[in-house]
């Protein structure tokens, strides 16, 4: 007797499909919930200093270009500062005038001036002699009652005036002979020193028009062009200290367990295809602007971001600022 299979349903394909779906769901769940080591990405940084001038001026010439390595004391650029040059000329003119005045005080009066003062003194002495004689004659006549007392008063006043004139002339002669007083000489010397101080000050500004490298490094960026006007303290160029490089990571605080102060970590530099050791030397909270906001309904909390800096334990050849750095 033959068996009729037309009424039976073939369940094998359905079972295979169901098993496949279950396997895919399980694999997807495992993939979704698996715990992988997260890779932190940072970058290489370098210490830089800005080159600027204390005086305003116009860029006259650059002696370096971007990417060039310079040494401490090298001339990087020169500024034109006509105002400073004019101030130097003014200070030198004041110094010359003060020096001449000081020389005059030290030398005293000329021979002609001394002779003229002496002649005036002698003339005044003659005037006193005449006034004394006139006064004596008028006084005798006044005592005899020949002349009124008013006439005696007039002659007495003339005599006193002649004596005062003689004393003034004598003082002028003494000053011409003895020269200026010590106080006057010291005041003249002080003016000379003041003028020389002004010259030194302006000369220091002249030196500031020559921009020099304060340390060895590489010129990373030049801001103005030749002929451009720059103000006091305005940056002219940046110089990177290539011997002082480190790596910076911005790390969410739940990942800070990877770092400890003075801890040594291994980082990878893709551009150099190299793994290097580095030491943690800096950790700081970046503030509220870098906070990871949590959804309060899930019971989580806001997490802050920390800036972590590590420095290679050995010099890394060909490491450049801005290169990516990875840490797992």
Image (tube, rainbow, N blue to C red):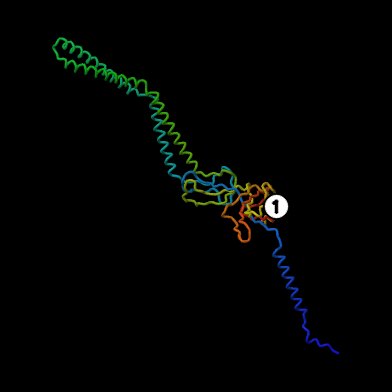
Q: Nearer the viewer, residue 230 or 312?
A: 312
Residue 88 appears left or right of 63: left
- Depicted 100 relative to depicted 58: above or below: above
Question: Residue at 59% across / 55% down in the picture?
Answer: 291
Residue 60 on image: x %, y % = 48, 48
Residue 297 on image: x %, y % = 61, 61
- The quadrant of the picture occupied by the C terminus is bottom right
Judging by the rendered image, the residue that carries numbered circle 1 is 266
- The quadrant of the picture occupied by the N terminus is bottom right
Q: Residue furthest left?
A: 146
- Within 10 Å of disc 1 (Cα), the crowding (few <14, some 14-19, many 20+) is few
Residue 326 appears left or right of 183: right
Q: Nearer the viewer, residue 113 or 141?
A: 141
Q: Nearer the viewer, residue 308 or 266?
A: 308
Question: Residue at 78% across / 86% down in the picture?
Answer: 7
Q: Residue furthest top?
A: 144
Task: Identify the image quadrant of residue 302.
Answer: bottom right
Residue 231 on image: x %, y % = 47, 47
Task: Identify the image quadrant of residue 11.
Answer: bottom right
Residue 17 on image: x %, y % = 74, 76
Residue 29 appears left or right of 305: right
Indicate the secondary structure of the residue bearing disc 1. Answer: strand
Q: Residue furthest right?
A: 1
């Amino acid at each position: 007797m033959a068996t009729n299979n037309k009424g039976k349903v073939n369940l094998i394909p359905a079972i295979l499909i169901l098993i496949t779906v279950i396997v895919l769901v399980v694999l997807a769940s495992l993939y979704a919930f698996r715990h992988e080591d997260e890779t932190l990405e940072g970058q290489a940084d370098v210490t830089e200093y800005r080159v600027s001038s204390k005086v305003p001026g116009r860029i006259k010439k650059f002696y370096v270009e971007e990417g060039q390595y310079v040494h401490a004391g090298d001339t990087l650029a020169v500024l034109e500062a006509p105002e400073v040059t004019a101030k130097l000329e003014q200070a030198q003119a004041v110094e010359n005038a003060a020096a001449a005045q000081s020389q005059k005080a030290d030398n005293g009066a000329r021979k002609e001036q001394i002779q003229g003062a002496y002649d005036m003194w002698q003339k005044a002495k003659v005037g006193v002699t005449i006034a004394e004689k006139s006064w004596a004659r008028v006084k005798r006549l006044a005592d005899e009652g020949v002349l009124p007392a008013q006439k005696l008063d007039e002659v007495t006043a003339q005599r006193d005036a002649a004596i005062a004139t003689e004393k003034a002339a004598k003082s002028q002669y003494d000053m011409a002979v003895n020269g200026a007083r010590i106080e006057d000489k010291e005041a003249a010397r002080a003016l000379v020193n003041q003028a020389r101080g002004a010259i030194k000050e302006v000369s220091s500004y002249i030196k500031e028009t020559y921009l020099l490298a304060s340390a060895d490094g590489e010129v990373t960026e030049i801001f103005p062009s030749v002929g451009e006007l720059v103000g006091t303290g305005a940056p002219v160029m940046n110089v990177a200290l290539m011997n002082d490089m480190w790596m910076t990571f911005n790390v969410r605080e739940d990942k800070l367990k990877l770092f400890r102060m003075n801890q040594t970590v291994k980082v990878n530099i893709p551009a150099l295809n190299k793994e290097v050791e580095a030491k943690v030397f800096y950790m700081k909270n970046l503030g509220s602007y870098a906070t990871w906001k949590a959804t309060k309904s899930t019971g989580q909390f806001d997490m802050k971001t920390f800036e972590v800096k590590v420095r290679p334990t050995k010099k890394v050849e060909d490491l450049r600022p801005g290169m990516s750095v990875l840490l797992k």
